[in-house]
Image (cartoon, grey):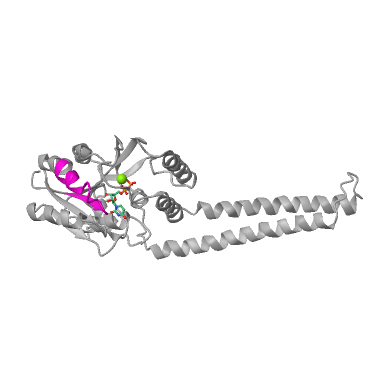
Amino acid sequence: MTNKLLSIITPVHNEADGIQNFIKGSLLPVLEKLTYNYELIIVNDGSTDNTLKIIQNLATNNKNIKIISLSRNFGKEPALSAGLAYAKGSAAITIDADGQQPPRLIPDFIKKWQSGAEIVTGVRSQYTKHGLIQKLGSKLFYKLLRLMGNKSTVPGSTDFRLMDRTVIDEFNKLSEHNRITRGLIDWLGFKQEYIEYIYGVRTAGKPSYNLKKLFHLAIDSFVSMSTTPLVIFGYLGVFITIGSFILGLFCIINQYVLGDPLQLYWNGSVQLAIFITFLIGLLMISQSITALYISHIYAETQGRPLFIVDQKESRNLIKK
Ligand code: UDP
Ligand code: MG
């Protein structure tokens, strides 16, 4: 067991204030105590402050520390993917560098992995010390995600996560650009377990994800993981079309067949309004159909594999 390698991946963007403390003070002490060898992959995601210098210094003194320095700021999701592409371990753990995800839980992640889980995801048990808007936003996000057909994402899942080698290899095959790691991992499948933890307070520096970025992230998740928003407007169109058709029929029969016994006096503009509403309904339906075609094209361009085989559970297969 002892010669097995674990990869720890941490993305950093302008974390000069806290990175030294985080790595030396809280992460390395945990890693040194593990019964595994470790490699700590720090992905510098285009930091413009002193971060790169600091982690390069750390790496000269500790050969287990590897630095991937991206050419510019690509965002946390691509940074994580870069780390996973270079990870050599039989499992990888991704963890934020701001101290909000406590490294002391790493042994718990490993225990779950040893007892068979292929993915162990950290779930925040409390929305600690987060602004009210973000708290509500996050709740709303998961509600909407569920509503839109993504039933598998557990509310509060974070990117504090362990992935088995099999999962990493499958993940590395994915080539889509607009990626939300969380959603993709859920899409991959495999045996997933959860660890609840209290999301800590940032130890230093500022979060790079402001409300605007989070909002974009949320929109991306919806757009890339489900087609329900497109279908909703289609249904609305069907509802409007049928509704206005019935209303129009009623109008004609009431006016011209029965001679307006209800004395509604629906004149030409009312009739026109009903007709236009009917047409708008048709437009919405055709829009939604077009959008579905586009979403299918989008899915094709993502180039995701058609299926993923769980090699461990399959039997008598010839391995490629
Ligand atoms: N991060 C990154 N690239 C970015 C933004 C953030 O690599 O463009 C890193 C950041 O240094 C930290 C982690 O991703 O280690 C989480 O970032 P942050 O604390 O800003 O996000 P939050 O905690 O709000 O999810
Ligand atoms: Mg943070």
Quadrant in the rendering for residue 125? top left
225 or 203: nearer the eye? 203
Q: Where the C terminus falls, by quadrant?
A: bottom left
Q: Quadrant of residue 191?
A: top left
Question: In this orientation, which residue lies closer to the viewer: 28 or 295?
Answer: 28
Q: Position of residue 262 (x, y in %)?
A: 88, 44
Whether residue 122 sits left or right of residue 104 in the image: it is right
Q: Residue at x 42, y 42 (%)?
A: 134
Q: Is residue 14 part of the magenta span, yes or no?
A: yes
Q: Quadrant of residue 156?
A: top left
- Image coords of residue 270 (percent x, y): 80, 54
Residue extent of the magenta highlight: 7-25
> From the viewer's perspective, is 60 left or right of 246?
left
The spot of residue 207 in percent (x, y) is: 32, 48
Residue at point 35%, 48% (across, down): 186
User: Quarter holding the N terminus?
Assistant: top left
Q: Position of residue 46 (x, y in %)?
A: 26, 60
Q: Tell how many labels.
A: 0
Q: Is residue 202 above or below residue 61?
A: above
Q: Is residue 201 above or below residue 187?
A: above
Judged left or right of residue 294, residue 91 is left
> Residue at point 22% right, 41% down?
113
Q: Magenta stretch containing residue 131, yes or no?
A: no
